[in-house]
Amino acid sequence: MDWRAVLVLLSIVGGVFTQNCRGEELKPRACENVCDENGQCKIRAALLLPKNTTFYASLPVVEPVLDLAIQSQAIRNAFPPWLSFEWTTYDVTDCDAAYAVISAIDAYNDCAHVFFGPACDFALASVARITKFLGNSGIPLITTGGFTFDFVQQKQTCQDEFYMLVRTSPLGFKDMAYFIINVMRQFEWNRAALLYESSAFAEYVGARGGHLLASTIHDYLIREGFHIIGRELQGNIPAIETLRHWVGFDYSSKSVFCPRGYWD
């Protein structure tokens, strides 16, 4: 964890402007306060990640990093001396969206002030949609995930789908799409064949991560006026055979792609 992320966290938790996204009167909940009646001040964080280490961000991998980060002098200096920090871990089993929501509710009931994770997009989307309704002013959610284009939209008000979500990830699928678009423009190409494995990126995004990436690239290419066909690779069929089937044997020529292969 970068010390700047901690400063972002502090600015969110200690911000003077908050909204009640339910439009209801505030309902006092003592444990939502950072400082208790005895003047003891502590930020309680919930780490919402899978125990399964096949995922890029998992509890066994991330928790030791947080331990080291808290011991860093730079991080300690970011906190005022009267404020302490602790976290509790919650297993988002196999990055499943349903388990993610249950973990978030458990963390809320345990009086967490902030969520770290989930990181995979399917689980993240489910949790990020409800955090603005938790407590009197929502619970901030900080994640290294959020690659699909919905997560990079505006998140300033209760009307925004993922209000309270903060992405620390520098890139998203939109950035990857426009990298491809810029390359195609550089070489004056206007057609592309997109072959993908549905399970690709699963360790980052969750199930069908390859499909999410491919559909995002497809959408942005279409928006920018390119022609594109897309097909999911099948495990028992070589990629070259899939390409030949949908594009033709002379797939390097300037011939028009087979119309039945277009994504509408």
Image (tube, rainbow, N blue to C red):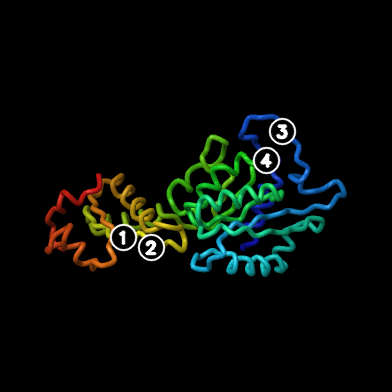
Mark 4 neighbour density, 10 Å: few (under 14) some (14–19) many (20 or more): many
Residue 196 is marked as 1
Relative to 228, residue 24 above or below: above
Label 1 near label 2: C-beta < 8 Å? Answer: yes
Label 2 near label 4: C-beta < 8 Å? Answer: no
Identify the residue at image location x=16%, y=58%: 247
Q: Residue furthest right?
A: 38
State the CA–CA distance, disc 4 to disc 1.
41 Å
Label 3 near label 4: C-beta < 8 Å? Answer: no
Residue 26 is marked as 3
- Residue picked out by circle 2: 200
**Badge 3 amino acid:** Leu
- Secondary structure at badge 1 equals strand
Mark 3 neighbour density, 10 Å: few (under 14) some (14–19) many (20 or more): few
Query: Which comes before the other along the chain, label 4 or label 3?
Result: 3
State the CA–CA distance, disc 4 to disc 3.
9 Å
Residue 135 is marked as 4
> Where does residue 204 sit, x and y in percent of width and height?
47, 61
Identify the residue at image location x=31%, y=44%: 223
Is 92 on the left or on the right of 247, as rendered?
Answer: right
Is 249 on the left or on the right of 201, as rendered?
Answer: left
> Where does residue 171 sit, x and y in percent of width and height?
46, 57
Q: Which picture quadrant has residue 214? A: bottom left
- Secondary structure at badge 3 equals loop
